[in-house]
Amino acid sequence: MTIKRRWSTVAAGLTGIALLLTACGGDDSDDSDSSTESNGAEGSGGDAAEEPAEPEEPITLEFQTLAWQTASMEANEEIVDAWNDEHPNIQVDLLQGDWNNVNDQLLTAFEGGTAPDVFHYESTVLQEFGDRGNVLDLSGYLSDEIRSDIREGAWDTVTYDDAVYGVPFLQESQVVFANATILEDAGIELPTVDDPWTWDEFTEVAAELTTDDRYGAVYPLKSPTNRILNLSRNYGAEFFEDPSGEATAVFGDAEAEVLGRIHDMIYTDESASPDGLGMSSTDALPAFFDGQYAMLPGAIWLRQQLMEQAPDDFEWVTLPALEGDSQQQGAVSQTLSVSADTEYPEYAVQFIEYFLNAENQVKLAAGDWLLPTSQEAAEAPELNDPETGWDVAVATADVLEIAPFQLVKGFEEWKAKVSEPSLQQFFADEISLDELGAKLTGEGNDVLERYRR
Amino acid sequence: MERTTSSAVTGLKYLALCAYLVFLAFPLLWLLSTALKTPQEIAQINPTIIPNDITFANFRAAFDEQPIARSLVNTAFVASVSATLTVLLSIPAAYVMARYRSVVSRAVIVWVLLSQIFPWVLVIIPLFLLLRDAGLYDSRLGLIIVYVVWSMPFALWMLRSYVASIPYELEEAAAMDGATKVRALRSVVAPLLAPGVVAAGLFAFVSAWNEFLFALVLIRDPDLQTISLTLVKFIGAEGVARLGPLAAASLVATIPSLIFFAFMQRRLTGGLLGGAVKS
């Protein structure tokens, strides 16, 4: 009996200790304060126009990139290697993160004080990171050179009050891709950058190109919110009143315009394929290559997929962004930011400025097929090649402005819980435009209400 | 007549078995097919299972761009060690839980059940802080400890039911023949428990092999990354994936676990205890 009890105690104890490791974790969640206090944010800032002197002892900065395309990764490695050669005492370790999990990974790293010194992400999250004290305000560190080279509209996407939480460097804009052979056979005159199609003209052409076995267009609408909100800027749609303050969802004629036009193309004119409802842009490519859709509105990065996947005999062309009351589009930026915990804020900013100089932005933009924010880079010949639609892509730079929703606290929840399902219902013709508006504002404001408290 | 019916039934059984095998093997075949296709062929509107132009460029791209081999070695090491530790720690605990009914034993059972209730995402940050303070962040050892703790409750329950299914009379018979407790455990219980140990080990191994979230949060050094972290590098913003290299890398990543399964499944023999005790 005694032996039995001893066995029992030892083995059960062993198990208990092992399991305790897990449970104990839950009690330590409040212990992070001592190690995660921001120190970099209180840095001196220094003279914004001067480069800091090289440190006497070698230091190492960690830089986490989200580059994933082959050319983009190569560009990252090339730039970092060049920096390391030129700055023997400020070595940069290149880490590769991934887009789909970077938010969880960074949030955990911020809490644990192990975030990389410099990290790549996008402007939509910087307000939250800034509010939490996770990112450094760069306003006191940036040189006049980079401030003047990057477009003002791009700076707007990373500026909250007076704080600058990142350096914007790549932006996405919306254009239209077309099967050149189909348009040529139909005798359609192609629009130019100086004379783009209006939405009305686009709708007419789509109807003209629609046949028994072909739709004039397809709108990939798998996750439509960001795209619809950005495109709706063509008609001045806001969707939110006082986005940077106590944001309220609104829905009026301007907000209804693009939504109504796309819906009508699918269900009234039947010139746009209803298949697009569950498709991402890349999902639509096989049928686009097969000639089932004549035109495919999409983001400029889709050119990379077209270059890589289109059959050899497939002729495609990039058409300029459509025009409503204007060609204005909302846009977010990919950014480089500095962790508030970094020990070397000046060197981190120095590295960012090097990484994002005009010459390097050309390489990065070419690698990701996105628009550089550097005005000098946008003039580079390789980013203006008409064969690959670069001339059209770069021309959208002047019409990009900060997407108002980016400023709205609670936007991500509004989007996930209200906007995405409601838009899906609307584009599936299950609810009317008025009902959609009522959902976006009624249910939407219930969500936003919590963020105002 | 009876013989004809019997042959027909046997034929149908084999047919059903073949259909099931195709069902099981199809994802793997599709992975192989995609891995051997060009980007143009992957984007064809009417995909084929046999590629028109077989290419190995996706394998070259996968190995050139990501440290697949190193990630596989890391994963194999972490999965093997954590599976071994899980089994070694679970066996004595499971034995006690099955054979001895004490307050501590019952408390452990409740604790094991409770530990399964909490979603792991809730404990990830505290766990991260705990490991960081212990100097185990960004190390294989830290990941192994987490995987052992993660797999143990289920392994424990699995082994506990295996132990409970071994009649205690067998140990009593061994004792009657003069065997010590240790000898009875080693010579009588251990062989009968082998299938359970293998099943628990396989579970722990596969769990560790496929695990992503803990590895994402706890490992930063590219030299220490496991294969799940490496595979996700082929997926970009908005879920756009480089399907060719991803399929090639995924295919390579499944091979070691397939070999491990093939090697271990022979030991997953059941029915050893049939007729051991007169009931």
Image: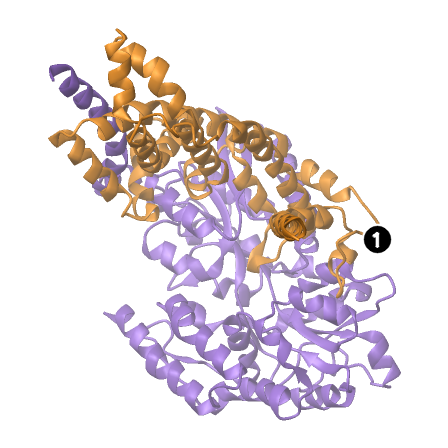
Q: Colour of chain B?
A: orange
Left or right placement of residue B141 versus residue B51 in this view: left
Q: Residue at x 76, y 75 (%)?
A: A178
Q: Which residue is mark 1?
A: B52
Residue B268 position within the rendered picture, expressed as x and y whole percent measured from the top left:
48, 31
Chain letter for mark 1? B
Residue A328, image quadrant: bottom right
In the rendering, what colour is chain A? purple
Which part of the image, by quadrant, shows the C terminus of chain A? bottom left
The vertical placement of B43 against B74, above or below, is: below
Pick the front one: B271 or A70 = B271
Q: Residue furthest front?
A: B1
Q: Which quadrant holds the N terminus of chain A?
A: top left
In the foreground, A172 or A19: A19
Residue closest to the far top: B178
Can residue A72 be seen in this snapshot? no
Residue A267 x, y percent position in the rendering:
61, 89
